[in-house]
Amino acid sequence: MSMISLRVPEKELNIFKSYAKLNNSSLSEIIRTTMLEKIENEYDLKVFEEYESQKENGTLKTKPIDELWKELGL
């Protein structure tokens, strides 16, 4: 497993440590999880914005739900 180093002011470090303790987790796990959630949220927002843009431009392609279920074998 790789390791990274992060410089933060002491006050912020204390906040991070308190949050980790409050959630019964390690500081490393809290930072890792928070970063992954942020990346996922930004990706979701980008996908949603593309969807809205296609919808607005009339270029959105959709399928009936029954057709989708057949494609997925459900």
Image: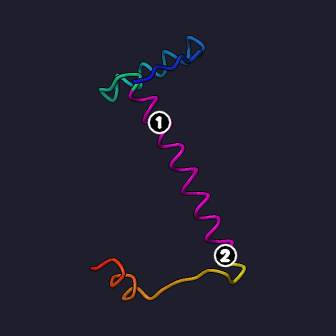
Q: Residue 41, percent across and down?
A: 53, 50
Q: Which residue is found at the position 33% from the left and 85% from the top?
A: 70
Give the side of residue 22 with respect to residue 50, left or right: left
Q: Residue at x 47, y 40 (%)?
A: 36
Q: Which residue is mark 1?
A: 34
Determine if the magenta segment contains residue 38: yes
Extreme residue toward the right, this view: 57
**What residue did someone put label 2 on?**
54
Three-letter code for the amino acid on which mark 1 is drawn = Thr
Determine the secondary structure under disc 1. Answer: helix
Query: Mark 2 falls on what kind of element?
Result: helix
Q: Nearer the viewer, residue 46 or 16?
A: 46
Q: Quadrant of the N terminus?
A: top left
Looking at this view, is 43 or 10 the one in front?
43
Please tell me whether residue 32 is drawn above or below residue 69 in the rendered image.
above
The answer to if 72 sits in the magenta stretch is no
The percent position of residue 2, horizontal first and vertical second, equals 44, 23
Q: Specify the quadrant that holds the C terminus.
A: bottom left
Q: Is residue 62 above or below residue 9?
A: below
Q: How is the protein colored in the picture?
A: rainbow
Residue range corresponding to the magenta coloring: 29-53
